[in-house]
Amino acid sequence: MESRAGVSKQDIREQIWDYMESQNLADFPRPVHHRIPNFKGSYLACQNIKDLEVFARTQEVKVDPDKPLEGVRLLALQSKKTLLVPTPRLRTGLFNRITPPPGATKDILRKCATSQGVRNYSIPVGLDARVLVDLVVVGSVAVSEKGWRIGKGEGYADLEYAMMVSMGAVSHGTPVVTIVHDCQVVDIPEVLLEDHDLTVDYILTPTRVIATGCERPKPTGIAWSKISSEMMGKIPILRSLHYREQQAGKHVTLQDEHRCLQETRSQQTAPPSTVRRPRDHPQLEPASVRGDHVPSNTVYIGNLPWDTRVSELKRALRELGTAPLRLTWQGPQHRAFLHYQDLASAQQAVSCLQGLSLGTNTLKVALARQQRASDPAGSRAGEPHPGPDLTI
């Protein structure tokens, strides 16, 4: 199957999904659109992994939870290899280790290889666990014989690999395998590839075993400039890695922060007539904002769950690298205020904390003065109060 010239990644995805459905090559779950597509013959394609020397010598293998990879998960368990499966959308961690019960029968092993088995027969693997993955198996929507891969567009396989690099769980020599239908092997223009895109070393189809010989470098770690604050808020383990790399002195500017820095630099280099000059007191906002005594370097956090502890909020702030100089806690009012060194630090924290959730609540985050100015009822929601509040 050939892809058209001048296409985007999404064009190629739609072409593959449409073709598999129209030719009845797709298998449950259907329709395959917006998925890593399962296909008729996927189990046969999975069997080809037994012919790879890299699988024979593998002790620990990471296999994505996609339906067409079920046969590989079963072979790994039958071969008594350690099987690691990423948690769906990384919501509760990075890996689960599949642990069949002692004396598991073939039927039990088959259940362990399914998505339900991954939930019922697994234990989570933390960041501090000593994990050394010998082989990575990923799903794909499209792949080229050169080893260039396109996923379903959410970036989780690329991110999972980058996180494994950051953990030291894989090296540049760790082989990557994908399993697809023959129709999913297409030409992919190199111009579509980005540095964070994962490439593959082997492609298994029902009829072929393709060694790509791909020399394009794989991701060398997490590209933080591609990570949004919203994604950080949804993936706790990503926040933990961000904090660790920040403590290690690595460059961890997020997508939102990177954009703000670029805008700041463009303002600094703009002609004098286009630059907004600071007032005599740059830490204060214009007098038109009501409540000038609220410091501009204060961040408002609202919609805190009723049972949230201050320690939980402080931990989340540390993990995101946004720990303030002081924190004023107003738990009974479901809010808190974060005090930073200056306005720039406060604005950076607001950007980083967008989308942060505690419990089931998505927190409201804004500069405190902006929050107060938007409260016409005079509830003084943006103003820290003295007295019984806890300042830390």
Image: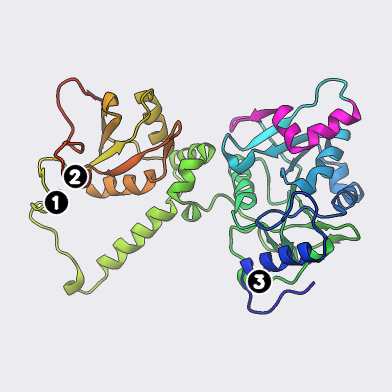
Q: Which of 44 and 31 lies nearest the eye of the viewer? A: 31
| Measured Cα–Cα span from mark 1 to mark 3 | 48 Å
- Residue numbers of the magenta segment: 105-129
Q: In this view, does 320 lie above or below 329?
A: below
Image mark for residue 190: 3
Residue under numbered circle 1 = 285
At label 1, the amino acid type is: Glu
For residue 369, the mark is 2
Q: Are marks 1 and 3 in contact (CB under 8 Å)?
A: no
Q: Looking at the picture, how far across and down is residue 27, in whole percent? A: 80, 53
Tell me which label, 2 or 3, sits earlier in the chain.
3
Give left or right: position of 369 versus 347: left
Q: In this view, does 134 lie to the left or right of 161?
A: right
Tell me how far mark 2 sits from mark 3, CA to CA.
Answer: 48 Å
Q: Are marks 1 and 2 in contact (CB under 8 Å)?
A: yes
Choose the circle earlier in sequence order: 1 or 3. 3
Q: Is mark 3 on a helix, strand or loop?
A: helix
